[in-house]
Image (spheres, rainbow, N blue to C red):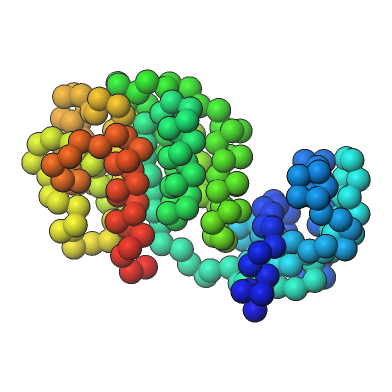
Amino acid sequence: MSELYGTLQRLYVREDLAAEGVILLDSKACHYFKNVLRRQEGESFRVFNGRDGEFIARIETLGKKEGRACIVLKLKDQPATVLPLHLLFSPLKKDRMDFLIEKAVELGVTDLHPVLMRRTSNRKINEDRLHAQIIEAAEQCERLTMPTLHPLSSLERVITSWSGLPLCWARERGNAQELGTLTEIPQAFLLGPEGGFDEAECAFLESKTAVKAVSLGERIYRAETAALVCLAYRSLLPS
């Protein structure tokens, strides 16, 4: 059934969703529907919240400051389980960061961890901007889950407190196992900044048993390219 509605615009909302429920549209959503998409009262769109699945909703009112829509049909159930996929990355400059966030969401990342390293060039992030990019990418790529954006933190703090999932460290130089030869499905990747990890960081990571160095091959990739190599590899493996 969902194929019949595939061309309808998707909208992410934070409120709970249920059959025959009501959605209150804020001024931003009203402006988007009315002035950008040229939608009118009575027209339909798709809506999801990352928890309850995906629904068809019909616009009832569109005002300047608020609007209202009613849910008329459930299209998809929310997945019962999602395999974790963490990306630990050094914040990049604006355009490259935009690209990285968009593609990471498209490739199924569940958790985004901005990490400060000694060679990190962009040492501040705009969390509101990143949240907006995450939402836009999720709306466009048909995913039902929403990635979690973790607070900016230092490499030492993140790694020291890391527990649970084995962490694949994309090491540019030095001894490391080829990514494609791993026997376990990777669920967490650590990528370095422009210029790579310094010697002290490499020594620190080597001392952690939960961190496994992996090689992406002979080429030295840009930071965002290395992230996409890892995530694209993971997306091709069975869930």
Residue 99 shown left or right of residue 144 in the figure? left
Residue 87 vertical position relative to residue 80 in the rendered view, above or below: above
Number of numbered discs: 0
Picture quarter with the N terminus: bottom right
Picture quarter with the C terminus: bottom left
Point out the residue furthest to the bottom here: 1
Residue 222 shown left or right of residue 44 in the figure? left
Point out the residue furthest to the left here: 175
The image quadrant of residue 174 is: top left
What x and y, as percent, mark residue 238?
33, 69
Question: Residue at 32% across / 35% down in the picture?
Answer: 223
The image quadrant of residue 199 is: top left
What x and y, as percent, mark residue 36?
76, 44
What x and y, as percent, mark residue 189?
31, 46
Question: Residue at 48% across / 49% down in the picture?
Answer: 105
What x and y, as percent, mark residue 24?
83, 52
Question: Residue at 49% across / 44% down in the picture?
Answer: 102
Q: Answer yes or no: is residue 225 visible.
A: yes
| Along the line of sight, the residue nearer the viewer: 158 or 114 | 114
Q: Answer yes or no: is residue 157 visible.
A: no
Residue 206 shown left or right of residue 64 in the figure? left
| Along the line of sight, the residue nearer the viewer: 195 or 209 | 195
Residue 6 shown left or right of residue 125 in the figure? right
Question: Residue at 37% across / 20% down in the picture?
Answer: 121
